[in-house]
Image: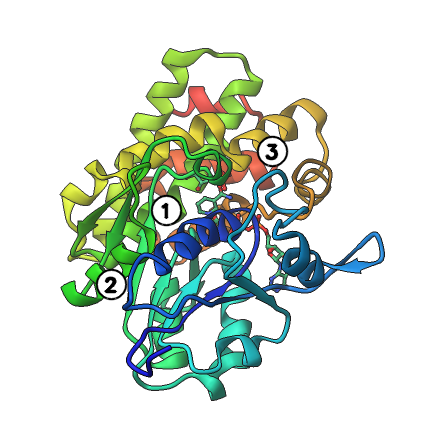
């Protein structure tokens, strides 16, 4: 190991975190630019009496979040976040968005000034002044430059090495190229846009539109209806991006992180699945998350709520009728048929 080499650390080990570790673990060994060993911070839990970190480090499989796929042996599960990030020069953030702030606070003291990061997180945070990008939260906590990666990327399909594309949003092209080396492969094609905000707004808001797609599926409305809702959703995603991030590029919505992710998530994602079940079973979101996702997390419900509250505060509900209807069906008992009638 040379001291010039990049030390990569993955923060998170869920479904996507584990699938991403397969790409990263393989790619670091192909280039002398990187150390071979990659620490993966794991939120520790015990399965049948054995710690998840021990299972990963001995069986090389995340049997809970990505069963059936081996992780490369150079991926090392570490339960202590400060120990995991020690000496890191590249941080890959891939946790459900609600945990990011707390994790940054925990690791802050161990992060060096020459570190760079990339967020694979699809979510957004909000405070009284408006929406907050996950990369901006990380930047403000850790003071490191950030890229974002998002795309039509259902983790299990990537683990199965089925072809897909993704998009890296960068501010500094050299950082973008470094991140591309970590992820790109014949079956996982990386594209670039100089639009960190656009990539993340797409990734967060498609989760809200996916709830609408699930409601539509519960109504058995068919493909034409779902396509109409997706088209309207895409327009509202763009409108939201322009309203809060004036530099977002319209081309970003044509990349994998935009229209392609919207399509994949409205057909194959967890948000769609839980939203259909929400209507069919009348169970609460928490119960459905617990029953259907085996520890994986829903992002769309929190985002739908935060988007709604932000738009309400800004007197902008009328500009976003589809996202408002989705919120009201999800949280205010609005009849599901309104998903179509409100168009
Ligand atoms: N799964 C996918 O197909 C996919 C694809 C692209 C992007 N994403 C995005 O990637 C991000 C991570 O999702 P994922 O699918 O890897 O995770 P996941 O939903 O599969 O798993 C949840 C993870 O959260 C961890 N966790 C639980 N409680 C925690 C706590 N208190 N603090 C910290 N961590 C805790 C669990 O250990 C687990 O690793 C999300 O923003 C998601 O939207 C997911
Ligand atoms: O399962 P979802 O709904 O969180 O979506 C997964 C990915 O974001 C699809 O690209």
Which of the marked residues, 3 or 2, is nearer the chain's N terminus? Answer: 2
Mark 1 vs ligand 2: CB under 8 Å? yes
Determine the residue positioned at 26% across, 47% down.
167
- State yes or no: discs 2 and 1 in contact (Cβ < 8 Å): no
Determine the residue positioned at 42% across, 35% down.
161
Task: Tell me how far mark 2 sits from mark 1, CA to CA.
Answer: 21 Å
| Residue 53, image x, y percentages | 67, 62
Task: Tell me how far mark 1 sits from mark 3, CA to CA.
Answer: 18 Å
Mark 1: give few (<14), some (14-19) or many (20+) Cα within 10 Å.
many
> Toward the viewer: 292 or 332?
292
Q: Which mark is residue 274?
A: 3
Determine the residue positioned at 62% across, 49% down.
61
Mark 2 vs ligand 1: CB under 8 Å? no
Residue 244: tell me if it is visible. Answer: no
The residue that mark 2 highlights is 178
| Residue 195, image x, y percentages | 19, 56
Give the farthest residue toward the bottom.
Answer: 109
Q: Nearer the viewer, mark 3 or mark 2?
A: 2
Which of the marked residues, 1 or 3, is nearer the chain's N terminus? Answer: 1
Mark 3: give few (<14), some (14-19) or many (20+) Cα within 10 Å.
many
Q: Quadrant of residue 88?
A: bottom left
Here the colouring is rainbow
Residue 153: tell me if it is visible. Answer: yes
In this image, 283 relative to 133: left or right?
A: right
The quadrant of the picture occupied by the C terminus is top left
SS label for mark 2: helix
> Toward the viewer: 247 or 316?
247
The residue that mark 1 highlights is 203
- State yes or no: discs 3 and 2 in contact (Cβ < 8 Å): no
In this image, 247 relative to 29: left or right?
A: left
Which of the marked residues, 2 or 1, is nearer the chain's N terminus? Answer: 2
Determine the residue positioned at 33% across, 42% down.
151
């Amino acid at each position: 190991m040379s001291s010039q080499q990049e030390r990569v650390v993955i923060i998170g080990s869920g479904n996507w975190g584990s699938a991403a570790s397969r790409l990263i673990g393989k790619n670091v060994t192909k280039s002398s630019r990187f150390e071979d060993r990659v620490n993966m911070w794991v939120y520790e839990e015990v399965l049948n009496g054995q710690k998840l970190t021990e299972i990963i480090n001995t069986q090389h499989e995340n049997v809970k979040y990505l069963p059936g796929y081996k992780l490369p042996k150079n991926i090392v599960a570490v339960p202590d976040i400060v120990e995991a990030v020690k000496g890191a020069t590249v941080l890959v953030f891939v946790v459900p968005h609600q945990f990011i702030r707390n994790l940054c606070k925990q690791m802050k003291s161990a992060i060096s000034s020459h570190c760079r990061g990339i967020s694979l997180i699809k979510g957004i945070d909000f405070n009284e002044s408006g929406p907050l990008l996950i990369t901006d939260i990380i930047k403000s906590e850790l003071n490191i430059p950030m890229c974002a990666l998002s795309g039509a990327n259902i983790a299990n399909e990537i683990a199965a090495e089925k072809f897909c594309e993704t998009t890296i949003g960068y501010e500094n092209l050299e950082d973008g190229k470094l991140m591309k080396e970590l992820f790109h492969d014949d079956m996982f094609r990386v594209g670039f846009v100089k639009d960190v905000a656009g990539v993340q707004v797409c990734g967060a808001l498609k989760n809200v539109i996916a709830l609408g797609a699930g409601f539509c599926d519960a109504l058995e409305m068919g493909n034409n209806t779902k396509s109409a809702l997706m088209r309207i959703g895409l327009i509202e995603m763009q409108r939201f991006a322009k309203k809060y991030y004036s530099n977002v590029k319209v081309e970003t919505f044509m990349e994998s992180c935009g229209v392609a992710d919207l399509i994949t998530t409205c057909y194959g994602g967890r948000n769609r699945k839980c939203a259909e079940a929400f209507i069919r079973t009348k169970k609460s979101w928490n119960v459905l998350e617990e029953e259907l996702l085996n520890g994986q997390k829903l992002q769309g419900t929190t985002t739908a709520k935060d988007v709604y509250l932000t738009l309400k505060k800004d007197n902008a509900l009328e500009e976003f009728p589809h996202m408002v209807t989705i919120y009201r069906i999800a949280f205010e008992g609005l009849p599901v048929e309104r998903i179509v009638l409100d168009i």
